[in-house]
Image: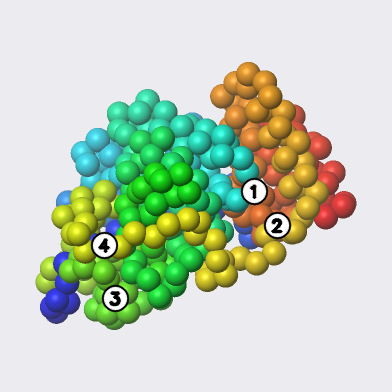
Amino acid sequence: MDLEKRVFVIPHFHYDVAWIRTEEEYLKRVYRILGRVMEIMEKDEDFKYVVDQAFYLERMKKEKPKLFRQVAERILEGRMEVVNAGYVMSDLNLISPFTIKKNYEVMNDFAKAEFNTKPQVAWMIDCFGHPGIMPKIAREANLKYYVFWRGMKEPDSTQEFFWTGTDGSTVLAHWMKHGYSLFGNRFNNLAKATYDLEPTTDIAFIPFGDDFYVPHEKLIQQVHKTKDAKFALPSEFFRELEKHENELPTLKGEMLSDYSNFRGYYSSRVSFKQLYRSAEKEVLNKEADEEEWKNLLYATFHDLICGTGIDESFCAGFPSNSDLKRETSTTLYHL
């Protein structure tokens, strides 16, 4: 099968700290997915994979040390890539720029300490909009590239472009026009996925995954059998895209629109937001230690602070080792 494009298939899964299931239920799925990925990579030397949030990697190190060591080995081999979605993938509109920056820093520090690697890609694939300050924050966190889905201000625009923020900082960006579940969910046919994508240049970024997605063997073999298609890591795609920089436009300002955005997240579960804001103010106004920062960052997760999850998620809106958890639980009576 000839796609008339060079197709970069990016295997991943999207992780939710807590949403329509609890944190512990989701972590069990994480371990099952990554266990299966390790099995695939043992047999298939061309398969590659993405991991994105420090929270589940940190928990995996503690609870599944053998699996964590296997993941670390694959990262050191260059077959897995740590992209930076932060300690958790926060909402970017409801928290302070200082907190967003700290979120990136926690992931950078974890990746350096555990895998001796420096993330290059800001992986903000399920955030409900992107303020104009994000290119500056990303570049200050040494992130050259930016991947997102929701909030695109010009939905008829190209999917690859230089994004210039409100202060003039610029990152090379890829917009997941059809979401992060293009291949493996929306399409099970790689040719149809590529045709629907309509890539900007002669290279195509095809996300292969979904929420807690286990890679399907038949689809893996479909990639191997397709001419000019290969498994790749996000940074590999961007390095190739940089060769086409003269073909790419520049978009300026914030990425916050009704296109693929979630309406009402400012007003959902207001009491939780108020509790978060008071906690954030306290942390920012003192010399908070790393554990206090992680407790705060946990609550910034986009499906928590935006109010989209089940009630049980908000009972655990701050981690169990946080003094704020008890207070958080009482807010449910007022939501």
**Mark 1, residue position:** 94
Residue type pointed to by label 4: Leu
Question: What is the C-alpha distance between the residues marked 2 and 1?
Answer: 8 Å
Quadrant into which the N terminus falls: bottom left
What is the total number of numbered labels drawn onto the structure image? 4
Q: Do labels 2 and 1 touch, CB within 8 Å?
A: yes
* Pair 4/1: label in front: 4
Q: Earlier in the sequence, mark 2 or mark 1?
A: 1
The residue identified by callout 2 is 266
Q: Is residue 262 visible?
A: yes
* Distance between the alpha carbons at the discs numbered 2 and 3: 33 Å
- Type of amino acid under label 1: Leu
- Considering only order in the chain, which callout, 4 or 3, is on the residue closer to the N terminus? 3
Q: Amino acid at mark 2?
A: Tyr
Image disc number at residue 248: 4
In this image, 74 relative to 138: left or right?
left
Quick one: quadrant of the C terminus?
bottom right
Q: Quadrant of residue 61?
A: top left
Looking at the image, is mark 4 or mark 1 earlier in the sequence? Answer: 1
Residue at x 21% of width, y 68% of height: 201
Q: Residue 50's x, y, as percent?
A: 34, 50
Return the residue nearer the eye: 33 or 294. Answer: 294
Q: Quadrant of residue 110?
A: top left
Instruction: Give how far apart the Cα atoms at labels 4 and 1 are.
Output: 31 Å
**Crowd rating for badge 4 (residues with CA inside 10 Å; few <14, some 14–19, many 20+):** some
Q: Residue at x 23, y 46 (%)?
A: 79
On screen, residue 165 above or below 154: above
Question: Which residue is drawn at the image coordinates 70% and 57% (left, top)?
Answer: 266
Query: Would you say residue 18 is visible in this rendering?
Result: no
- Nearest the eye: 315 or 27: 315
* Residue hosting label 3: 198
Q: Is residue 69 above or below residue 24?
A: above
